[in-house]
Image (spheres, rainbow, N blue to C red):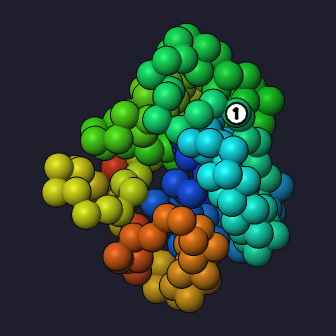
Amino acid sequence: MLNKQRTMIIVPHLDDAEFGMGGTLIKLCKENDPKDVKIVVLCEGRDAENAEARLKAYAKNIFLVGFQTCVYHYKDMELELVPLKEITKLIEDELEDFKPSRIFTTSESDIHQDHQICAKAVKIACRPNRYVVDEFYEFMIPDNNPWNATYYDTVVDVSDVQIMKTTICETYTSEKYSTINSREFFRTIHRNWKI
């Protein structure tokens, strides 16, 4: 699953990639040239204070892990106010510019509305008549909400990078989850979608 490919991770929030797939992110950056791994973040925070703290933590993780990134300035919990067409176009432009063959994004079945909107926009941007990717994965953000249960068919063992994953998650002092798993779960949406 983690063979050398250009990989783009598209998330609504600054901490989503680290909490949802931080171990996989670390492995991707170790096993690939870090310039071939890019995270696109749609929202910078809820307010100026929150955004500043999260941006500092995110910047520290860029230094620790070594990935490319682009952060847009939408507000957390307000993506539903932005036309889906606008978000999709932004993602299409990122795809055309970076040209990844593998995509990771949040799950459309997640209960968090920003995660749903992000996933939907990514799926629209990656439809066969627009931008074709070889691999497309949704990932879950661990939390204590039992309604976020989804079937995932791909598991990555991240036990060998567990300490580093814990380190990058702990940079976000305002966001704490009770469990940081040694396995990360993904649902494969489209595989080899070449038409």
Res 104 seen here: yes
Residue under the point 39% across and 70% down: 177
The type of residue carrying mark 1 is His
User: As rendered, which of 134 and 150 lies closer to the eye?
Assistant: 150
User: As rendered, which of 141 and 1 lies closer to the eye?
Assistant: 141
In the rendered image of this protein, does residue 14 appear above or below residue 182?
above
User: As rendered, which of 113 and 52 lies closer to the eye?
Assistant: 52
| Residue to which mark 1 is pinned | 73
Q: Position of residue 82 (x, y in %)?
A: 54, 17
Crowding at dot 1, Cα within 10 Å, few <14 / some 14-19 / many 20+, comes out as few
In the rendered image of this protein, does residue 133 appear above or below residue 45?
above
Res 127 seen here: no
Residue under the point 37% across and 34% down: 113
Q: Position of residue 166 (x, y in %)?
A: 54, 81
Is 35 left or right of 180, judged from the image as shown?
A: right
Residue under the point 57% across and 57% down: 15
User: As rendered, which of 5 and 18 lies closer to the eye?
Assistant: 18
Q: Position of residue 165 (x, y in %)?
A: 56, 78
Is 160 left or right of 58, judged from the image as shown?
A: left
Q: Quadrant of residue 106?
A: top left
Question: Could you tell me how many numbered marks the image carries?
Answer: 1
In the rendered image of this protein, does residue 137 appear above or below residue 20?
above
